Amino acid sequence: MHALATQRLDLEPMNESHADMLVEPYLDPRVWTYLPHLRPADEDAVRARLKRWLSPPPPELPNAIAFENWIGFERTTRTLVGTFQATIIQDFSATIGYIVLPGSWRQGYAVEAMTVVCDHLREAHSIRRIRADMYRDNEGSAAVARRLGMIEIPPPNPTDRAFEKVIR
């Protein structure tokens, strides 16, 4: 995995040295508005989550080949914008996700970062199908998925929404 860049962002491969800078933002309840059950309880929980993201996929995800995670910074100010993730699956598909921090909301960073992540997945891993799952009331993430060229598909459960893009 390597660094990625957009017009405004530098996406660095996530590593353990990023843990300190993620603790405070990840404890902000606004980050977890649509996923309150995933909100880390404390600093140790944030660090444990980062450790899971940096590890190989667990046995309960038998079709997952790898996790790829980046931490995004605004290029000129080096302001932390968020984290961006892909789970690569054996069937040449991937599931994507992101967390944009509140100070960076509604500035187009999610679309910008995930566009370059999707391009990377296609070029580096020959990914042919990309999926994004989200809580059904998260209209912002649904708009991001649409801007990435994804179409809405039946979700895995009734509280979610799912979007998918087939790459030819």
Image (spheres, grey):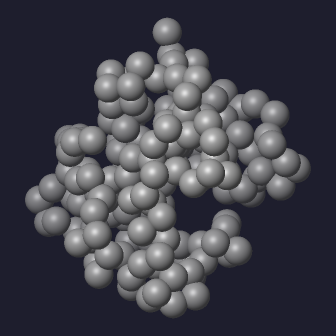
Q: Which of the two residues, 71 or 43, is positioned nearer the viewer here?
A: 43
Tell me what residue is drawn at x 85 percent, y 48 percent. 157
Horizontal side, residue 141 vs residue 76: left or right: right
Q: Quadrant of the N terminus?
A: top left
Tell me what residue is drawn at x 33 percent, y 31 percent. 120
Horizontal side, residue 161 vs residue 82: left or right: right
The image quarter in which residue 4 lies: top left
Tell me what residue is drawn at x 22 percent, y 42 percent. 2
Residue 130 position, x and y percent, is 55, 30
The image quarter in which residue 90 lies: top right
Whether residue 95 is visible here, answered yes or no, is no
| Residue at the extreme top of the image, as rendered | 168
Residue 85 position, x and y percent, is 44, 50
| Residue at the extreme left of the image, as rendered | 76
Q: Which of the two residues, 159 or 108, is positioned nearer the viewer here?
A: 159
Depicted 137 relative to depicted 51: above or below: above
